[in-house]
Amino acid sequence: MDRQVVVITGASAGVGRATARAFGERRARVGLLARGRDGLEAAKQEIEMGNSAVHMAAAGAPVSPFFRFPDLQHPPPLVSYLGERSIAIFSTDIDSFDFKIRKPDQVVKSVMTKLEKRGKGIILMHDFQHATAEALPELIRQLKARGYKVVHMVPRQLLTTIPKYDEMVTQQRKLSSNNMRPETNVIPPTGARVLEPWSFEPPSSAGTSKSSSPGSGGAGG
């Protein structure tokens, strides 16, 4: 079945952006029309803050400059921007449509049939789909048997971040931390008992009042 074609105006923010993402998740072909530079700058900021957050989470480990647009949409200005930043863009050549398939053998058939027609390419799959996870061993076996090879991409250079966005992410984390209520200010409901962190008490029917913590090897009784 051909994909649905949708043109969305005001797609840079708000309802327009949310609508574009919703149709993208349904694998529609989405055309985006927006005005002004604000939407473009907001998208750049979202990308760069994401880069900074990943770099911080890696804690010094190398991060590859690879990127995939949400919903497989590729706005030309952002494609050009990522090129200027030396960030490689990945998309897909073959959609397994595994989110619509419930049986592992059908996932394998979907992928192999499309791959044989195209000969090569990037396959889109979702490892959180149960059928996909069960299909992987057989899919890998068939790929190997038919002479296909899995390519390991290695970047020429590592991801670099921009100090301005590093600072924005740092400030965002500080605000999130400051918004957490301290436990000393939490008032328990009437009649409630406050237990020590990481501890629990078994019910009276267990025949013991011993508490257990994660490092104790389990509850007694």
Image (cartoon, rainbow, N blue to C red):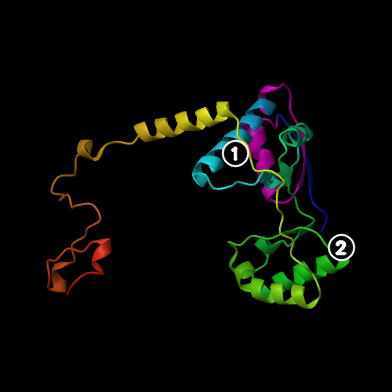
Cα distance in 3D space between marks 2 and 1: 33 Å
Residue 54 in percent (x, y) is at 55, 43
Residue 118 numbered tag: 2
User: Is disc 2 placed on a helix, strand or loop?
Assistant: helix
Q: Name which residue lies at 67% across and 43% down.
A: 65
Tell me where residue 73 sits by quadrant.
top right
* Label 2 neighbour load within 10 Å: few <14, some 14-19, many 20+: few
Q: Which residue is mark 1?
A: 51
Q: Nearer the viewer, residue 152 or 40?
A: 152
Front residue (pair 112, 29): 112
Amino acid tagged 1: Asn
Q: Position of residue 136 (x, y in %)?
A: 65, 71
Residue 192 against residue 56 in the figure, above or below:
below
Quadrant of residue 183 in the image?
top left
Q: Which residues are magenta?
A: 11-39
Q: Specify whether residue 103 is in view.
A: no
Of residue 164 and residue 199, the one placed in the foreground of this image is 164
Quadrant where the N terminus sits is bottom right
Q: Is residue 115 left or right of residue 15?
A: right
Give the secondary structure at mark 1.
helix
Work out whether 139 lies above or below 196.
Answer: below
Is residue 36 in sight in this rendering?
yes
